Image (spheres, rainbow, N blue to C red):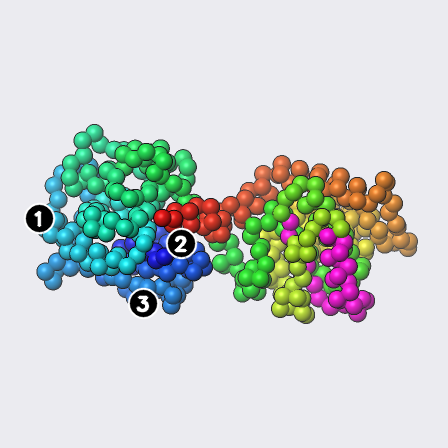
């Protein structure tokens, strides 16, 4: 399969929103291993190619913007009627001949605003000529602005902005615009689809987070738990895994626990990690749901600044620690919008948690001058499962947490690709 992205860009400045949208689609296509050609105006400056636009896997093609040696100037024909300039049809013919050659080896052509924008009317007419000859190509016409009202009796060539093109699917970023889109192009709503603009939330993060995301999925889990700390039994890593398992078992949500661990002399790391995984699996996790950054390239600890970034992605912070003098990681997690579950039996966590309106559970703890030990009735498992259900319900009812999680999941490039864009690339 080979896909062409037809943009007719004259420049590639990231201040232009469409440049960013196309960049997202290029990332998706290349990540899927699809041969991709970018088609732009011949006046587009090669020196402006940055980021994904500089990827060596991309094939570039430039479409003529000259007629008899003279530059073609694009006129804005946003009005539904009037007169086109004298050389309009000759320009369209010249562009069509070049486009036919550039598109002759592709299976799909994704057009961005070519059929919509008034200043692309000449390209609109040209691509229709190409479609008549290259009937094997499936066209996808993306509209990135509010659809316009269809005039009662549009006349050629202005009518090309309001009439359907064969073998073409029409796309809009939201469902709310589908009815208007179908009316503009006079096509059934069944020929229209939605492809959201995506949010690549990890793109601006550190190389450490990107490296971690390359190895484990930080985007799709319903519940993402980040727990940083020295790998000592006093931090009660196994209790985090146990509660995470109970959440997965009770709710059937997808759960991922990432331990940002660093070595401790208290216990053999490999032995303790196996215990943590075992306790998580006993309560409902699979081994794939648990990850240690020390196993993923950071044996001496994950960089602290990048832990902050991970808290931006996560939505649940569990701290069952046996002893704390303050609990700085609690503040760090709170500052990045995580639901807090703290050990009420630890004085410092109780004090801080009350101020932060945290959810409290009870685990064994060290107090001032004495230790406490919890007894669960009927069992610790039932205690975990009861609280797991309450925690998830509270998280669902929190609009900020809900929005944060949805933005990470449903508007990610991965979700948009698998659920919206990739299905369009089917013969």
Q: Kindly tell me whether residue 123 is visible in this rendering.
A: no
Query: Where residue 314 sits: x, y (%)?
Result: 61, 51
CA distance separating discs 1 and 2: 37 Å
Give the residue number, with chain letter if any, for mark 2.
25
Query: Which residue is farthest top?
Result: 152
Mark 3 or mark 2, which is nearer the start of the sequence? 2
Instruction: Report if the CB atoms under discs 3 and 1 are less than 8 Å apart.
Output: no
10 Å crowding of disc 1: few (<14), some (14-19), many (20+): few
Residue at numbered disc 3: 47
Disc 1, SS: loop
Q: What stretch is highlighted in magenta?
A: 255-281
Q: Which residue lies furthest to the left in this view?
A: 86
Residue at the spot 25% in from the left edge and 33% down from the top edge: 150
Q: Relative to the observer, which residue lies in front, 383 or 200?
A: 383
1, above or below 409, in the image: below
Q: Nearer the viewer, residue 31 or 407?
A: 31
Residues at circles 2 and 3 in contact by the CB criterion of under 8 Å: no
Q: Is residue 422 left or right of residue 380?
A: left
Q: Are marks 1 and 2 in contact (CB under 8 Å)?
A: no
Q: Among all residues in the image, which is located at the extreme right?
A: 370
Task: Name the residue rendered at 32%, 59% in the picture.
Answer: 38
Q: Helix or strand or loop: what does disc 3 sit on? A: helix
Reading the image, the residue beneath label 1 is: 86
Determine the secondary structure under disc 2.
helix
Q: Which residue is drawn at 75% across and 56% down?
A: 278
Answer whether residue 314 is visible to the viewer in this image.
Answer: yes
Left or right: where 361 falls relative to 17: right
């Amino acid at each position: 399969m080979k896909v062409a992205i037809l943009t007719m860009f004259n420049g590639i400045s990231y201040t232009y929103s469409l440049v960013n949208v196309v960049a997202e689609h290029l990332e998706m296509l290349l990540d899927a291993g699809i041969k991709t050609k970018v088609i732009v105006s011949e006046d587009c400056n090669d020196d402006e190619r940055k980021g994904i636009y500089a990827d060596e896997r991309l094939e570039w093609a430039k479409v003529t913007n000259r007629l008899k040696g003279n530059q073609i100037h694009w006129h804005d024909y946003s009005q539904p009627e009037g007169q086109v300039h004298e050389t309009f049809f000759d320009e369209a013919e010249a562009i069509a001949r070049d486009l036919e050659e550039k598109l002759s080896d592709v299976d799909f052509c994704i057009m961005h605003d070519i059929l919509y924008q008034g200043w692309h009317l000449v390209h609109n007419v040209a691509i229709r000529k190409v479609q008549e000859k290259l009937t094997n190509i499936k066209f996808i016409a993306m509209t990135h602005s509010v659809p316009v009202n269809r005039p009662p009796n549009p006349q050629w060539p202005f009518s090309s902005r309001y009439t359907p093109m064969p073998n073409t699917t029409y796309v809009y970023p939201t469902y709310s615009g589908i009815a208007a889109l179908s009316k503009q192009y006079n096509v059934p709503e069944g020929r229209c689809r939605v492809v959201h603009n995506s949010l690549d939330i990890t793109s601006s993060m550190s190389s450490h987070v990107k490296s971690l995301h390359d190895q484990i999925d930080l985007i799709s889990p319903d519940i993402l738990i980040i727990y940083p700390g020295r790998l000592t039994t006093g931090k009660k890593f196994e209790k985090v895994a146990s509660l995470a398992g109970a959440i997965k078992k009770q709710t059937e949500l997808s759960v991922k626990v990432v331990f940002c661990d660093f070595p401790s002399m208290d216990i053999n790391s490999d032995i303790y990690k196996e215990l943590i995984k075992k306790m998580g699996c006993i309560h409902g996790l699979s081994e794939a749901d648990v990850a240690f950054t020390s196993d993923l390239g950071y044996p001496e600890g994950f960089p602290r600044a990048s832990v902050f970034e991970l808290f931006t992605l996560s939505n649940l912070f569990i701290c069952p620690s046996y002893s704390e003098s303050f609990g700085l990681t609690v503040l760090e997690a709170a500052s990045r919008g995580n639901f807090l579950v703290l050990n009420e039996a630890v004085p410092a966590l109780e004090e801080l948690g009350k101020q932060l309106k945290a959810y409290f559970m009870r685990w064994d703890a060290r107090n001032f001058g004495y230790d406490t030990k919890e007894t669960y009735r009927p069992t610790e498992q039932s205690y975990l499962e009861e609280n797991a259900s309450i925690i998830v319900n509270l998280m669902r009812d929190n609009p900020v947490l809900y929005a944060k999680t949805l933005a990470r999941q449903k508007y990610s490039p991965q979700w948009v690709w698998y659920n919206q864009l990739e299905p369009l690339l089917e013969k």
